[in-house]
């Protein structure tokens, strides 16, 4: 045997046999011995340990005989050693004139590593091919294909090998074209189901194995797919008596269930990001009152794309009082940058790792699409589900909350699922949707859980955004912060409906009828529990929304007493009879407190006595210095500069003016 490489030896032998040979780099074509020079019947290719060839119109052994070669001549060395990652060595050599293949085991014989597993691509999206022997792995490398094989191929069951390097990978098992090869491929494929992301069985297009397929000039895309192997399907029966019932745990009562995907939606420019920052800040300090996490400071991941981290997001969180050591920002490191963007669902495993390692309880997506893969469309139902469903499953698995900020379109309407820009799947996948709207009458924000599959009730909160100053490295900066005013009977959907509902004549007629009914009801009762009034109103055929509008139109006063707290409705205390007569005549009374629109000026909100509205109790009583003298609610760091909430000052002034009018009229 000469000292030349097997590739050169093979080319020389072809030329010596009178064959026409064409070589281009590490590949070539030739006519078969004894055939016309025009047939190009042999394809061959160099590998890292020899040469592989495939004759299209002749027998391989016959070609070697005609060239005066044996099988051992196809390798650079008579004895070829394959080194496994765990120390196993497989030596191949030939006997009987260089044509009978024999293998010997050496090194760490008890090893279970796959040959080629140490040279796989770090990119987990790269397809991995499982072949039957070391020669096929080497041939695959020559074609730029990542391949592995287990020790002794078809002779060992797959359970004797360590297949963990293929976890969550796309795998194609290549079957040799014989019964034994197909049986072996089927066993390996079934073994990998559940470990790999997907498992497909394919067969070579030419020759017996992958080496022949590549020698013939075919690529991985030319493999003949036999089918995808899926886990065996069967039905599991669970008796109801075996199911442990569990209560819903609320992070924010009625708004944000633990282990869920929640959306915070509203039109642009209302302050949704400021609300999200406030929620995140409260989580870091354990300050979400009434929820399961109250008093338990927790860690938050804040993913953002629309605002600057240094100039907007961090100052906004600081203004909300966040413990910044519990706020995590994530960037993806790549070969070219340290500030890549997380891309879901492909990066879901990395995100899961951070959640587990850092014990994260809340992930804020500002906006909801901040981590959505650029390959997915927010307008396509199926693609939105590809993005959201793994997130929802992750939230349930890790008992955390994903809060996504999303935008409403410009059209009016009270179906918030349809108002969200893009696919309806956004609201369908989420367990809770919180809608934000602005009350144009008072200028405050109203937040309502407009979708709450698990919530026992619809709950609305009123809020204002106030300016506060935070310290930065460049000096003080003015930042907006949320101040919650308490619960309200306003509904964000009512505000979002806008003109769409205002010109509905049937709705107008229903409201007028509801106003007359409620006026008569409260005149007869004098004072009624709000729950009774709502219940009887529903029995009379009015919706809760229509009754609330009627209540505001009539200026119904609300008070509360007792424990548990009970709220009461009554007509305005001044000239109630005159008010009723005026409404019947279609005219307006002369005193401020009898105006039907007087309800717009507020009064203590029905559900929360801490709302920043003029209280029904005596406001002249002394209040602690850290509480507002009007509403008796904590002043907080933002609105406490002059010892009274700004809106309370305005409302108190308005109320005082109205009382003077009433007194003057009575005189």
Image (spheres, helix red, strand yellow):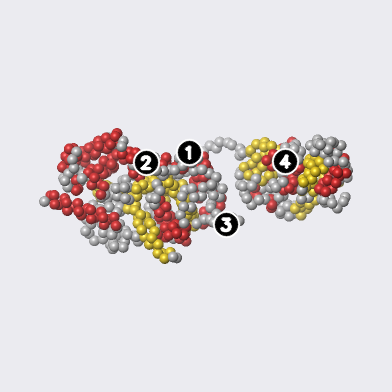
Q: Which of marks 4 and 1 is in front?
A: 4
Q: Where is residue 650 in the image (x, y as percent from the top left)?
A: 26, 55
Q: Residues within 10 Å of mark 4 (few under 14, many from 20)?
A: some
Question: Residue tagged by mark 4?
Answer: 218
Q: Does 588 sit left or right of 611 as displayed?
A: left
| Residue 412, numbered circle | 2
The residue carrying mark 1 is 240
Query: Along the line of sight, which residue is nearer the eye, 298 or 494?
Result: 494
Residue under label 3: 337
SS for callout 3: loop
Q: Is residue 204 above or below residue 336?
A: above
Cα separation between marks 4 and 3: 37 Å
Q: Is residue 146 visible?
A: yes
Q: What element carries label 2?
A: loop
Please tell me the numbered disc located at residue 613.
none
Residue in view at x 63 percent, y 38 percent: 228
Q: Of the two numbered discs 3 and 2 on the same chain, state the one appearing first in sequence.
A: 3
| Position of residue 171 in the picture relative to residue 256 (left or right) | right
């Amino acid at each position: 045997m000469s000292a030349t490489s097997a590739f050169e030896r093979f080319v020389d032998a072809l030329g010596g046999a009178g064959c026409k040979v064409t070589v281009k780099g590490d590949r070539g074509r030739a006519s078969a011995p004894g055939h016309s020079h025009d047939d190009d019947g042999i394809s061959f290719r160099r590998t890292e340990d020899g040469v592989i060839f495939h004759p299209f119109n002749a027998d391989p052994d016959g070609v070697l005989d005609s060239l005066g070669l044996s099988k051992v001549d196809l390798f650079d060395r008579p004895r070829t050693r394959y080194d496994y990652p765990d120390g196993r060595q497989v030596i191949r050599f030939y006997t009987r004139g260089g044509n009978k293949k024999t293998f010997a085991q050496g090194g760490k014989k008890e090893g279970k590593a796959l040959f080629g597993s140490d040279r796989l691509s770090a990119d987990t999206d790269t397809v991995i091919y499982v072949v039957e022997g070391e020669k096929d792995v080497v041939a695959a490398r020559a074609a730029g294909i990542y391949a592995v094989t287990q020790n002794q191929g078809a002779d060992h069951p797959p359970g004797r090998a360590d297949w963990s390097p293929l976890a969550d990978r796309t795998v194609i098992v290549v079957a040799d074209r014989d019964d034994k090869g197909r049986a072996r491929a089927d066993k390996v494929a079934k073994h990998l189901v559940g470990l790999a992301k997907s498992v497909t069985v394919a067969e070579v297009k030419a020759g017996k194995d992958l080496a022949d397929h590549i020698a013939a000039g075919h690529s991985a895309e030319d493999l003949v797919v036999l089918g995808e192997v899926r886990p065996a399907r069967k039905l599991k029966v669970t008796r109801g008596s075996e199911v442990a019932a569990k209560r819903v745990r609320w992070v924010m009562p009625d708004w944000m269930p633990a282990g869920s995907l929640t959306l915070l939606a509203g039109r642009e420019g209302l302050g949704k990001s400021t609300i999200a920052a406030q929620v995140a800040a409260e989580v870091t300090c354990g300050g979400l009152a009434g929820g399961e996490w109250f008093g338990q400071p927790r860690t938050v991941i804040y993913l953002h794309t629309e605002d600057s981290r240094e100039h907007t997001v961090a100052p906004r969180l600081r203004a909300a009082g966040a413990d910044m050591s519990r706020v995590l920002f994530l960037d993806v490191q790549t070969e070219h940058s340290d500030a890549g963007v997380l891309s879901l669902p492909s990066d879901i495993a990395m995100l899961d790792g951070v959640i587990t390692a850092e014990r994260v309880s809340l992930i804020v997506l500002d906006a909801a699409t901040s981590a959505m893969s650029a390959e997915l469309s927010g307008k396509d139902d199926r693609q939105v589900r590809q993005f959201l469903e793994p997130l929802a499953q992750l939230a349930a698995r890790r008992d955390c909350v994903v809060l996504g900020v999303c935008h409403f379109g410009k059209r009016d309407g009270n179906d918030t699922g349809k108002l969200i820009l893009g696919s309806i799947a956004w609201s369908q996948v989420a367990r809770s949707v919180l809608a934000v709207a602005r009350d144009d009458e008072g200028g405050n924000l109203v937040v309502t859980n407009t979708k709450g599959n698990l919530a026992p009730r619809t709950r609305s909160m009123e809020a204002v955004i106030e300016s506060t100053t935070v310290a930065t490295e460049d000096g003080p900066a003015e930042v907006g912060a949320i101040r919650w005013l308490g619960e309200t009977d306003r509904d964000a959907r009512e505000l979002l409906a806008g003109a769409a509902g205002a010109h509905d004549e049937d709705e107008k007629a229903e409201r007028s009828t509801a106003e007359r009914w409620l006026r008569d009801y409260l005149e007869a009762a004098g004072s009624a529990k709000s729950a009774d009034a709502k219940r009887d109103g529903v029995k009379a055929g009015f919706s809760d929304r229509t009754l609330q509008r009627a209540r505001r139109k009539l200026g119904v006063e609300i008070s509360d007493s007792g424990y548990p707290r009970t709220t009461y409705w009554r007509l305005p205390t001044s000239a109630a009879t005159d008010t009723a007569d005026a409404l019947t005549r279609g005219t307006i009374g002369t005193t401020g407190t009898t105006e039907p629109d007087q309800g717009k000026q507020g009064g203590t909100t029905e559900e929360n006595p801490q709302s920043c509205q003029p209280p029904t109790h005596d406001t002249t009583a002394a209040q602690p210095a850290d509480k507002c003298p009007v509403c008796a609610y904590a002043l907080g760091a933002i609105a406490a500069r002059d010892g009274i909430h700004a809106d309370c000052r305005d409302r108190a002034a308005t109320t005082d003016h109205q009382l003077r009018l009433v007194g003057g009229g009575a005189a």
